[in-house]
Image (cartoon, grey):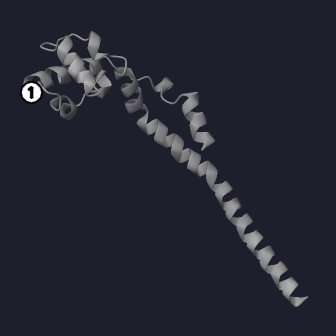
Amino acid sequence: SQIQQLGGLEGFIAKRTMLEKMKDEMLGLPEEEKRALAALHDTAKERQKQKFLEGFFIDVASIPGVGPARKAALRSFGIETAADVTRRGVKQVKGFGDHLTQAVIDWKASCERRFVFRPNEAVTPADRQAVMAK
């Protein structure tokens, strides 16, 4: 009888400890959500700019010295939009030395200059829901 009571007491203590831990996790959720939403706002401009640059395709771009064959070479290295362009990435493509690499970088810069940050669209409802779902 004493062993059953002890086991019962141990079981109660174990369940209580588990419930206290769950309570602490639940109370911490709003703070965690605030941090995640703040991170969304902090990265909003870069994410918006990335999406904007993904709309500029190298195939239809006018880049001095870069014709259809060189554009195909860029595509084969995964460089399809202005968002994909990095100096290091372009330099890895055969036939792209300093001059042509700079031409592609300049094209990306011209695309970036057209970007206008829209703070009212910084965090979409889908972004918020993704945070809340975690």
- Relative to 77, does residue 15 appear above or below in the rendering? below
26 displayed left or right of 97: right
Q: Read off the residue under disc 1.
A: 97
12 displayed left or right of 77: right
Q: How many marks?
A: 1
Q: Along the line of sight, which residue is nearer the eye, 119 or 97?
A: 97
Indicate the amino acid at tag 1.
Answer: Gly
Location of the C terminus by quadrant is: top right
Q: Quadrant of residue 27?
A: bottom right
**Position in image of residue 101 (x %, y %):** 14, 25
x 57%, y 40%: residue:
131
Q: Secondary structure at mark 1?
A: loop
- Relative to 24, does residue 88 appear above or below in the rendering? above
Q: Quadrant of residue 118?
A: top left
- Relative to 88, does residue 21 appear above or below in the rendering? below
x 62%, y 41%: residue:
133
Q: Residues within 10 Å of mark 1 (few under 14, many from 20)?
A: few
Location of the N terminus by quadrant is: bottom right
